Amino acid sequence: MTNTLLAPEQIERLLTSLDRIASALEASPSSQHEQAIDFSQAFAYRWQRNSGINHVPHLTPVTAPQLIAFNQLCNIEQQVARLQQNTLQFVHGYPANNALMTGARGTGKSSLVRACLHAFHQQGLRLIEVEKQHLDDLPLIIELVRQRPERFIVFCDDLSFEDGEHHYKALKTVLDGSVAGAAANVLIYATSNRRHLVTEKMADNLELRKDSQGEIHPGDSLEEKISLSDRFGLRLHFYSFSQDEYLTAVTQWVSNFGFSMDDNVREEALRWATEHGSRSGRIALQFARDYAGRALLKNAVKI
């Protein structure tokens, strides 16, 4: 009997193949989520890969999600109306669009998604938050909930992709190009500070080409990057707050803590915005917390 020794490169190829098989088995629907999920126990979940038995990807319930009501959102009435209508159609089983919210930081993009969950979770709406490095698992997540009676928003917050990151390709496929088809009970809502989610380079513009008629067409790289945003049927843009809009938000948040707006509060709020270099709903809420906390503590000490 002759002993056959494998060459080093053959051993390396064999190990690579075994790794691929192991990864495929780990990601299979039967192994990734053997326990049934009771979606009546929570209405917000996180998709996690870095914990649990054997690091099997799974849904983790968020027992106390931070929610907000639509009427607490200031200066974005048009965006609220459009996403609220889109989500209302969705929870009633009618056609609705995946949504992308872009624009200035702190202006209410992710808060608007949480407001949708606040308004519609009693009608069966559920939210699954997925980090961008786990977007390759989107087909797995969709198959996990496809047959469920609930309606699911897969939420990707603060989404953007730098040069060399390829997770956006999985997202693009799920949004529009999957041969399996989109699940009727799943929508994707994403937020980003960028209008175009993928970093564009000067080199992309060098790929512009001409056809036989002399017409100019975008290069393949540039076309692929721009097309990701285009695959969201509903695109909402959020703008930086003016001073008056910022003060309107401050007035609302301060009143929520039981205080009224006066000249002193106004001056403090403007100074706070200057120190933080921004005027937004987030900055207004941060100021209101600081102001209310200081005032309540001062009153408690006096007592």
Image (cartoon, rainbow, N blue to C red):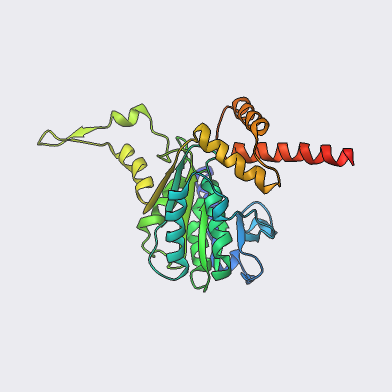
Near-viewer residue (248 or 6): 248
Residue lying at the far left in this picture: please name it: 213
In this rendering, does residue 171 appear at all?
yes
To which quarter of the image does residue 65 belong?
Answer: bottom right
As drawn, is 173 to the left or to the right of 293? left
Q: Residue at x 66, y 36 (%)?
A: 287
Give the residue drawn at x 43%, y 60%. Answer: 85
**The C terminus appears in which quarter of the rendering?**
top right
- The x and y percentages for residue 220 are 29, 39
Across and down, in percent, residue 79 comes to 44, 49
Q: Note whether 142 is above or below 285 in the view shown.
A: below
Viewer-closest of 224 and 26: 224
Tell me residue 75's x, y (percent): 49, 44
Q: Is residue 38 left or right of residue 120?
A: right
Instruction: Look at the picture and state if 16 lies above or below 243.
Output: below
Q: Position of residue 125 (x, y in %)?
A: 54, 66
From the viewer's perspective, tell me whether residue 148 is left or right of residue 220: right
In the rendered image, which quarter contains the N terminus?
bottom right
Choose between 100 and 50: the one closer to the eye.
Answer: 100
Residue 170 seen in the figure:
no
Q: How many marks?
A: 0
Residue beneath the point at 61% across and 45% down: 252
